Structures are given as C-alpha cells and as structure tokens.
Amino acid sequence: MALQIITANRLLDGEVVYLGENAEWIENLSGAKTVDDADGEANLLAAAKEAEATQKIVGAYLMKVARDAAGIQTLSVKEEIRAKGPTVRYDLGKQAR
Amino acid sequence: MYRYDEFDSDFVQQRVEQFRDQVERRIAGDLTEDEFKPLRLMNGLYLQLHAYMLRVAIPYGTFNAAQMRKMAHIARKYDKGYAHFTTRQNVQYNWPVLKDIPTILEELAAVEMHAIQTSGNCIRNTTSDQYAGAAADEIEDPRVYCEIIRQWSSLHPEFTFLPRKFKVAVTGATTDRAAIRVHDIGLAIKKNAEGEVGFEVHVGGGQGRTPMIAKAVRDFLPKEHLLSYLEAILRVYNQLGRRDNKYKARIKILVHETGIEELRGLIEAEWERIKDSALKLPLDEVDRINDYFAAPAWEKLDATSRLFEVKRFEDRGFANWVKANVVAHRQAGYAIANISLKPEGEAPGDITDSQMEVVADLAEKYSFDEIRATHEQNLVLPHVKLDDLFEVYSILNTAGLATANLGLISDMIACPGLDYCALANARSIPVAQAISKRFSDIERQFDIGELKLKISGCINACGHHHVGHIGILGVDRKGEEYYQITLGGNANENAAIGKIVGPSFSYDSIVDAVETVVNTYLEIRNGKEESFLEAYNRVGLAPFKERLYA
C-alpha cells in the first residue's frame, strides 16, 4: 500500500494541517504521521472524524506521499503549494514563517 | 451613484447579525460543516487552499472613495495587505480568519457593501460596462437597470435555490465591454425603429466546461417589462433546469437541449401571463433610480487641453499611458482613465492597501468620487478632466499604478489558479507573470496591437480563456501542470468561443508557445491595421498549428 498521511484545513483560520505523530493537528508536513497499511489508514480517518466532530478541522482527506532522505515529499503541485504557500508570494503562507 | 435606502440598510445589517450568529454556532459545534457551508457561501465565504476567502460584491462595478478606503482598511487589518479584483467586478480577500468575518461584514455594511450574491445558486451580482455613464457610444446608462435587477433579485424567494448559479450582464453601449453574450442572460440596451429604448435579450451564454454563446430570445423588450421578462426566463429555468447533474445545470444546457425556439415559446407564454402584474416597472420608479446615476456636474470645457497636449509631447511615459489607457469621454474636456492592475511581472488584479488609498484619493479629487472595477481586472476613473490627466498619471506612477498596457498582450485576465484556488488544476498567475515579462517592451506591445490573452487554471473558466483572442487553460496530467491554447475567442458584440489549437504545453514551454503564436501573427498579418483577431479570422488555426507543432 502506498505511503499516506491525512490532511485538512483548520476550522478557525483555514490553515492547512496534517495529523502529526503525536495525534495533534500540526502545520508542517515534515511532522505528519505516515501509514502504509489498511489499519493505519483507518486510524487516520478515525482521528480526522473525531477532529471534525470537535470543530478542529474541516475537509479531511488521505494524501499519498513519498519519503526520502530529506523527509516526507508531496506528489503533486497542488499539495506542494498547500504545504508551502503561493508560488507567487513567498512572503505568504507557511514558507514565510 | 445609488445610496442605500432604509430597506437596504436593514436587510444588510440583519444579514450581518444572522451570519455572526451562524459563525458562533459553527465554532461552538452547534452547526456541522455540512450545515454551515451553504450559509457561509450565501455570504461570499469560501474555503480555499491556504485559508478562507471572502468575496465582496461591487454591484455593477461602481464604487466610491469611502468604499475603496474601507476595502483597503479590511486588507490591512484583517488580511495580508492586499486585495484581488476578480473577473466579475468583485473583490476577494485571500486570508481572513473565520471569527473575523462577521466584523468584516459589519465594516462593509457601514459603507453600503456586502458579500451577498457572490456565491451559491442564486442570481449573482449583476455586471456591466465599466464605462457606464461616461462612454461616448452609450444609448442609456445600464447601471440604472442593473440596480433595478439588484433590488428585484436580492433575496428573491423564488430564485434563492436555482439549479445552478445565474449571471446577468447589461450593456448600454454599442460596443459590448461587459461580455454579455457569455452570461446566462445578457441585456443590450437598444433603440427600436420608433426610437424607443428597450432591451435586446440574450439567454444561455456561459463558459465553464461547456462554453456557449447566448442566443437572442427577444429582439426588443420595452423597458417597463424588464423584470417580468427576467422573471419569466428564471421561472422557466427554475422549473426545467437540471438538478441531477451540476455540470448540466446551467441555463445554457437547457437552451441547447430544448432549442431556443421552444424555450422562447415557454418564456413568452409565461411572460404573457405575468407581464402586466406588479412586476411591470413604473416609469416614475425608473426615473427615481435614474436620478441616482445622473451625470456629475461636469464643467463646460474645450474639447482639447493645451496642458494635456504639452505634457503628452514632453513625457514619453505619459504619452504611452494616454495612448493605451485613456479613452474618449462623452463630455468635452474629460477623459476615461483606466488604471491597469497588470504591472510587469505582478499578479493580475492584485492591489495593495496603500495603492487602494491612492486610487480613493484620486477618485475623490479628480473623478467625482467614482471608481469602477472592470471584469478584465482593472480599475477606472471614469470622469477625469484632460487638464488633470498628467497629475493623475504622475500620482499613479509614483504608486506603481501607471502601467500602460490596456487591451495589449500584458493586460491579461488570469484567475487565481492553483496558487490559491481549491478547484484549480494548474497555476495561472505565474504563467501570466512570465508572459508579462516576456512582452514587457511597450513598443513591441503597441506593434502587436490589441490582443486579449486570458488564462484559466481549470475548466470552470473564471479566467475567461474561452473568449480570449489567445486563451490558455491549465490542466492536470498526473499531478503535473499542462496548458492548452485556444485561439479566436472573443467576448465583445461579435462573441466567439476559441478553438483548441492542439496538444497542450508544459509549464516550462507555455510562454514560448504564446510567443510563437504572436510571432506567427506578426508574420502573416496584412499590415499593422489587421489585428490579431482579424488575422486569425482570415487564416484560421492552420498557420499557428503548423508553427507550434513543427
């Protein structure tokens, strides 16, 4: 099974978040919890369902990723932009922090 | 310009309070996202890639200095110091947080603005000619009828949950600057053989995944029947428009599948039934609304200005700006000054809070407190004295707002694309920026002449690529961005949908491809007098295709 993480937007400000290793919703892709089996996927979905029910996040979905020596890597332009910010304004989004 | 009456103020304020309560209930968990989403969309609030996005209505693109200053204030206090003017004469903020939205709406209400009718399956904000009230070729001011349509359509109980969104555009001039033939309903003010003023009514235009040019459903509609006829069209659409498939739900599909003749029969039958009802416009009410749009107190001036001519001779930058951005006004001694929001290498339609305040000051001092937003993502000072043009230009130039490129290749429409939009498949803005840099030489742009290039980051076509002389559509191929080129589209009174030239180009090759198209045109044109579109219409796709895929 492909390597996956789960992502969403935070309810209060729409910030892109990922479920982290410590079961918290974090802003950086690098700390996301990865899974590669059906049980892991089910756990991610269950955590997202709970977070949606408690007004932490909206629009959660599983997202395929790769891992290399530098860490977790996105597999599409869209997820790369979500992970960093607009490619036309480096002063905005996560890349600006 | 129109000022809110008691009813308008009450209903906008009520909506602010309703939405404040809805946001509080959402944050508290009393509303689920499924319950909240349609409510937030009714108030112009989307969730995009990085954050929420608030779309604020600028009815028919007309606003004033106080409203612009408020928009600047919102950009500075609640957003990231800039705003984005859209292809529907609206403005968008890309970074507001949820809890601030009701307060932002309250601030907007204080200057008679709101975000209603900017989303959802309702009758959207009516758009119009940005030169309304100033254009030399105008029959009547279309804003009067846009405002009447606004009053009729806002919160219309029958049309709040249509099969799909519904867009109306109105032009009052012989040259269509409002792209009415790619709207669900397009209205062109015209005179009949008797000299009476009414509307030519077009229905079923639109872009998106199934682009269509609207068809004329009525050649002449007396103006007192405007609302009854619109109601008849909307009623037929509301009953017969598809609700089982959102991609087939727009009225253009109904027109296409039913046929204009049959649909006209249904509309006219319904109209016969209701045309003498309360929907018949009292002409004194038209006059009352007309008074809001009375011409400003223009001075009686000479048609020429010595100061203007001297400065144009002395200052090459000013001369270029006048050549590209200044348009003839109906009143002697005045001009229409376009402010391009397409500086070299910048995001089309973006403007900073400080720049917004500069435009507000200029409008107040030099343009009778009027500003217009255009569907081509620029701004307009509609009534500037020729004597004042150089001063206006100098202040714009200092603020980085004096780019001379209106209607030229670098004056592109581009949707926000994948840099912001959750629906997009590919980026639009960096493509526009790269094209802008490639064609930055103003003499080269003047040599190329009028060329409308329009870029969409997905098939929803917010960037109007279907009606670009050159259209660019971003597509996704297994997570990678590719760009399809269309040629020959046109949004004016000779509206046409562009034709796909061939296989798409990669992100790295699309700008070269555009340059190849332009160079091909320069080689084949019959002199400078033959525009890109005229040359294309003469030769078709073949020579462009040959060069692009050689």
Image (spheres, coloured by chain):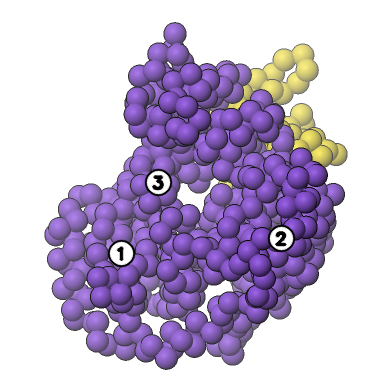
Chain colours: A yellow, B purple
Asked if residue B285 shows in the view, the reply is: yes
What amino acid is labelled 2 in the image? Ser
Disc 3 to disc 1, how far (Cα)? 18 Å
Disc 2 to disc 3, how far (Cα)? 43 Å
Label whose residue precedes the other's in the sequence (2 or 1):
1
Seen at 27% across and 54% down, the residue is: B215
Which residue matches tag 1?
B201
Q: Position of residue B237 (x, y in %)?
A: 28, 63
Seen at 68% across and 48% down, the residue is: B322
Mark carried by residue B207: 3
Q: Position of residue A45 (x, y in %)?
A: 58, 40
Which residue matches tag 2?
B305
Q: Is residue A97 above or below residue B304?
A: above
Instruction: Report the chain holding disc 3.
Output: B
Q: Position of residue B51 (x, y in %)?
A: 68, 49
Question: Callout 3 environment at 10 Å: few (<14), some (14 to 19), or many (20+)?
Answer: many
